[in-house]
Amino acid sequence: MTARSGITDDIGAGGVPSGPGPGGAELLAALLDGMDAALCALDADGTVTHWNREAERILGWTAAEAVGRHGFEGWAVRRADAGDVRERLLAAMDTPGRQVHEFALLRKDGGRVLVRTQSARVLGADGEPAGVYCAFSEVHAQIDLERSIALSEALFDDAAWAVVLVDVDLRAAVVNAEATRMLGAPRAQVLGRPLGELAGQGVEELEGALHHVLAEGAPRGLVDLWVTVAGPGGEQRRCWRSGFLRLASPLAQEPVPLGAAWVFHDVTDARLAEQEADRLRFRAGQLHRAGRAAAECEDPMEAATVCMDFALAGFADHALIDLAEGGGRLVRAAASPSGAPGPVAGVAGGGFPVRYEP
C-alpha cells in the first residue's frame, strides 16, 4: 500500500512511527487492513492515498487499483455524482469534527451500493488540513446496527416486560425499570448481586434454566417460573412467564458466552384464575360422580360414606360423619383415617358422642 506524504506525516505525528520495522508503514498497513469498517483517505487535491481491505470487500476495487486515482469519478462513483461526492468529502477539511453523508458508490462489477460515510479532516505536521479520511459501511448494515441499539435502549427504558442481563456467574449486570419493580429492590441493590439473593423459593429452577442457556442455548418457547420475592406485606409467591436468550460476542472467532438475557412478565393472577377454574371443574365432576355412586347404594350410611370418598379428592384431606340423636347430642358415626389416606368407614363400636363449641 502506498501513501502520500501529507496524510502519512499527519498520522505519524499522531503517534504511529514512520521509521522502518514493525512500528512503521507495515504496522500502519496492518492497522488499516484489520479495521471492521471500510476506510479510504484523500489528500488535499482529492487523490486517494489509503484504501483498506474492508473497502475492497464492499466495492471490489483493490488498494493497487484505488490508491493514486484522482477522486472517485468514473470508477467508484458515477460521473454525474462525482462532483457532488468530491465536494462534500473535501468540505470536511474546513470543518472540525465528523461529517456524515450517504452516497451511492459503484462496485467493480458495475453494481451500486448505498453507503453511509463519516469523514473528517487530517492535519499535517504544520497543523494545516492535509486531506480527509473517510470511513464507510453499507447502509443496511449500519441500519441493522442502529436498530439493534435502538431495540436495546427501548427494552431497558419503557418495555412492559422485565429484562435482566446476567453474566456467566449469574450476577445481574443490566436491569430495566420493570424488572426492579417486580424484584422489589432498587436497581443499585440488584446490580452485581447473584440471583439467589434476589429471590427465594423457586430460584433454583431459574438458575438451572440460566445455566442451561449458557451451556446449550435458549430453550424453545416460554416457561412459567414460580418464585418467591419480597413484597410490601412480606414474601409473595409470583408466577413469571419467562424467556431466555444466550448472549455471545459477535467479535469473537468462536461463540463466547457473555451471559444471558432473561425476559419475563407477571402472570400470577391469570395462573391462579386457571388453577381455581380447574379446581371448580374437578369438584363439579367429583360431586356428579359421588351422586351417581351414592344413588346405587341401598344403605343410607353406605351412600354417605361413598359420597365422602369422592368428595375428599377435591374438597378436603379428612372427612367425618356425625349423627344427631335425641337431646341434640351428636355421635361420630364414620370418619376417614386420621393422618393417612383411606376410605371413610364406620366407627367401631357404634360410635361415640362428640362435643362442639357453642
Image (tube, rainbow, N blue to C red):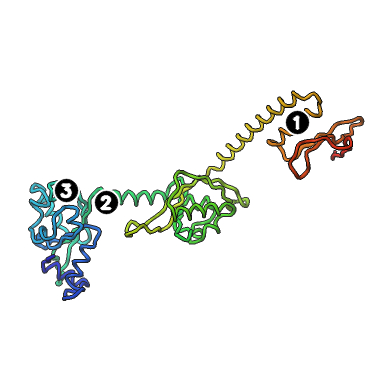
Residue at horizontal 75 percent and vertical 31 percent from the top: 306
User: What percent of the width, then of the height, locates residue 241?
Assistant: 50, 45
Secondary structure beneath label 1: helix
Left or right of residue 310, residue 211 in this image? left
| Residue in front for this viewpoint, 228 or 321 | 321
Mark 3 lies on residue: 104
Circle 1 Cα neighbour tier, 10 Å, few/some/many (<14 / 14–19 / ≥20): many
- Give the residue type at disc 2: Gln
For marks 2 and 3 on the same chain, the one whose residue lies earlier in the sequence: 3
Mark 2 lies on residue: 142
Mark 1 vs mark 3, foreground winner is 1
Residue at horizontal 22 percent and vertical 53 percent from the top: 137
Mark 2 vs mark 1, foreground winner is 1
| Residue in front for this viewpoint, 43 or 88 | 43
Circle 2 Cα neighbour tier, 10 Å, few/some/many (<14 / 14–19 / ≥20): some
- Give the residue type at disc 1: Val
Mark 1 lies on residue: 306
Secondary structure beneath label 2: helix
Circle 3 Cα neighbour tier, 10 Å, few/some/many (<14 / 14–19 / ≥20): some
User: What percent of the width, then of the height, locates residue 35?
Assistant: 24, 61
Tally the numbered discs: 3
| Quarter in which the C terminus is drawn | top right
Q: CA distance from mark 2 to mark 3?
A: 15 Å
For marks 1 and 3 on the same chain, the one whose residue lies earlier in the sequence: 3
| Quarter in which the N terminus is drawn | bottom left
Res 93 visible: no
Q: CA distance from mark 2 to mark 1?
A: 74 Å
- Give the residue type at disc 3: Ala
For marks 2 and 1 on the same chain, the one whose residue lies earlier in the sequence: 2
Residue at horizontal 86 percent and vertical 31 percent from the top: 324
User: What percent of the width, then of the height, locates residue 118?
Assistant: 21, 56
Q: CA distance from mark 1 to mark 3?
A: 85 Å
